[in-house]
Image: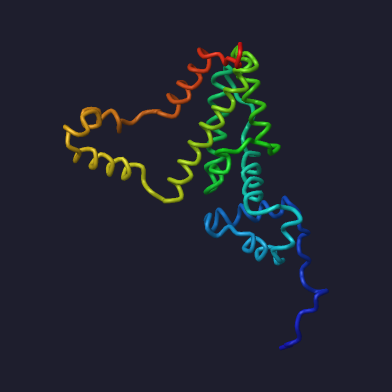
Amino acid sequence: MSTQPISRRTRPAKAPLSRDVIVRTGLEILDRDGLDALTMRRVAKELDTGPASLYVYVANRDDLMAAMLDAALAQVPLTAEGTWREQLHSLVAATTEAMSRHEGLAAVALGAIPTGDNALLVLDRMLALLKQGGLDDTTAAWAVDLLYLHVAAAAAEQSTYDAKGGDEGDTIAAADRRYASLPADRYPMITSLRQALLSPGDRDTWGLNVLINGILHTPARQEGS
């Protein structure tokens, strides 16, 4: 058996580095090994290169995660059946699901202004639907900020919950035991509303309806107007 080292000419050629390749590799690491494993060094190792090579395409880990989030949003269908309101519900649900699918990515959207191509497509579609609902330009613009924040927060919560691998029934049961142990004289409202606080139901749909109804009945007012 030959012990000669493999010639560099006979080794499989590495895929050329690009921003898209780095982003895909980052998503693979994130989904396989979790958020803590996602480092520039780890991505470089997976691509059989040095970390310095990555910085030609991504500025840092934060830039990489932002690009990964935008890649995830490419999976969001921008059109659906139904009224503008039904379509907005579908878009919000799909965007929340896409953000929450990969651990930690939804948190990137919190406190950031969307600038990625796919995030902007989602926002553009949201604005179109809000305009169909009869909103003026300023109200639609402010409303899309509120809706995007709602999506990011809901997705971050779901992503964190999924990463812990918990069971929703166990979580609710643990909360119910805690609430049941509370002294009624100190927490009168929580103890009296304990059943309602933990009751099942489509809270996501209700919450989004609250936002939409509030937006429709609260036109934005520019300072001085």
Q: Is residue 123 left or right of residue 204?
A: right
Residue under the image location 80 percent in, 74 percent down: 10
* Residue 210 lies in quadrant: top left
List x then y, in percent, for residue 192: 21, 28
List x then y, in percent, for residue 216: 53, 14
Which colouring convention does the figure follow? Answer: rainbow
Position of the N terminus, as image quadrant, is: bottom right
* Residue 133 lies in quadrant: top right
Q: What is the count of numbered marks?
A: 0
Outermost residue toward the right? 9
Q: Nearer the viewer, residue 76 or 211?
A: 211
Q: Is residue 200 above or below residue 128?
A: below
Q: Is residue 49 above or below residue 142?
A: below
List x then y, in percent, for residue 142: 59, 23
Residue under the image location 24 percent in, 42 percent down: 178
Q: Is residue 102 above or below residue 37?
A: above
Q: Is residue 151 left or right of residue 48?
A: left
List x then y, in percent, for residue 198: 30, 33
* Residue 30 lies in quadrant: bottom right
Residue under the image location 31 percent in, 45 percent down: 170
Position of the C terminus, as image quadrant, is: top right
Q: Is residue 166 left or right of residue 90?
A: left
Q: Nearer the viewer, residue 7 or 131?
A: 131
Q: Is residue 108 above or below residue 9?
A: above
Residue under the image location 63 percent in, 13 percent down: 136
